[in-house]
Image (spheres, grey):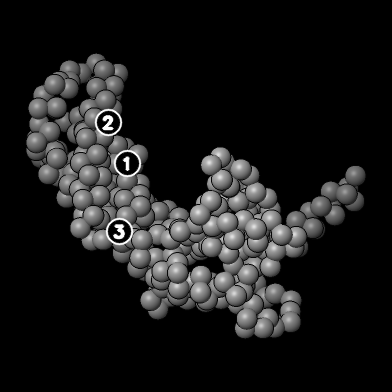
Amino acid sequence: MAGLAKGLWDERRGGGDERRRPGWAVRLPTDPARRQLVIGWAVVLVAAAAVCLLNVLGFTQGGRGRVGEHVVYEGSSWLAIALLAWLPWAALQGAKTWPWGLRLVAHLAAALVFSLLHVGLFILFRAAAFGVLGQPYDPVGAVGAYRYEVWKDLLAYAMFAGCYGMVGLVEAVRPAQPAAPAPPSPALPSEDLFDIRDGARLVRVRLDEILAVSSAGNYAQFHLRDGRRPMMRSSLAALAAELGPRGFVRTHRSWLVNAQAVRGLTPEGSGDYAVALDEHQTAPLSRRYPQALRRLRAPAAS
C-alpha cells in the first residue's frame, strides 16, 4: 500500500513539475473573448470597489454619517454591479460586426437595461439589509431618485465598456504564450493550409480543421473543430471560389461546408436538410442547391 501511494505521489509530482509556479496562480481561459470577459470583469469590480470605498470614507468623514448605513448603500450598489458587469461585454461581442450606428443603438439599449437592473437590485439589497438591521428604508423614495441614478449608470456603463475594449486591445497585441514543444511532424503542403486574415491578424489552420464557413454581414465566420470562430473580412462568394476546388461545397446562400467533415444529412421538410458536421455543429442545406445535395450524398465526397 505504501509503495502504491508513493508511486501515485511520484507520478503526480512528475506530471506537475513543469506547470507548478510559486504562489497562487489563476488559470485564464485561452479563448480571447472569454479572456476579455474575465479580465475586464475583474478590473471593473476592483475599480467599482475602490469608488464605493472612497464614497463611504467621504460620506462618513468627520462623523457626518453613520458608517454602517453608508456601507450598506455602497455595498449594495457594488454587489449589483458585480452581477451586471457582463452586460457591456455582451453588447461589445454581439454587435462587433454591426455598422457603427447600430452599435451605438445596441449600447444605448444595453446601458438603459443595465441602469434599470442596477437600481432595482440595489433597492432590493438595501431593503433586505436594513430589514435585518432593524432600520427604516424607503424604497419608494429610492425609485423616485432614479432620474439622478440613471445618469451615473450611463456614465458607469460607458466606462465599463471602455474597460472591456481596452482589455480586448491589450489582448490583441499580447504576445502569444509559448506552446509546449510538439513532436516533429512532416511539413504540410501549402495547399492543405488556409490563412484566415482580419486586418493585421492571421490565423493559419489546416483545411480539415475547418468544418464550415458562414456569412456574417461584411465578414465570414469560420467554424473550426476546436470550437474557435475566427472572423475574416470577405464575401462568401469569394471564399467559395477559393475553397470550392479544395473540397468545400456551397449549401446555402450563407453557408459553405467542408464536404470531408459531413457526418450526416437530416431532412427538414420542403427539400431542405440539416448537415451534421460534429456533435455540436450543423449547417443548413437549401433545396435551392441540389448540386450540393448530390455531392454530399455521393460516397466519399471530396
Find the distance from the CA under tag 3 to the CA under tag 1: 23 Å
- In this rendering, the answer to whether 134 lies above or below 235 is above
Mark 2 crowd level (few <14, some 14–19, many ≥20, 10 Å Cα): some
The disc label shown at residue 280, or none? none
Mark 1 crowd level (few <14, some 14–19, many ≥20, 10 Å Cα): some
**Would you name the residue on which mark 1 appears?**
84
- In this rendering, the answer to whether 192 lies above or below 109 is below
The disc label shown at residue 121, or none? 2
Name the secondary structure under disc 1: helix
The residue lying toward the viewer, choosing from 288 and 62, is 288
Find the distance from the CA under tag 2 to the CA under tag 3: 31 Å
- Is 276 on the left or on the right of 162, as rendered? right
Where residue 76 sits in the image (x, y, percent)?
27, 34
What residue type is disc 1 on? Leu
**Would you name the residue on which mark 3 appears?**
98
Where residue 102 sits in the image (x, y, percent)?
23, 55
- Which of the two marks, 2 or 3, is nearer to us in this view? 3
Name the secondary structure under disc 3: loop
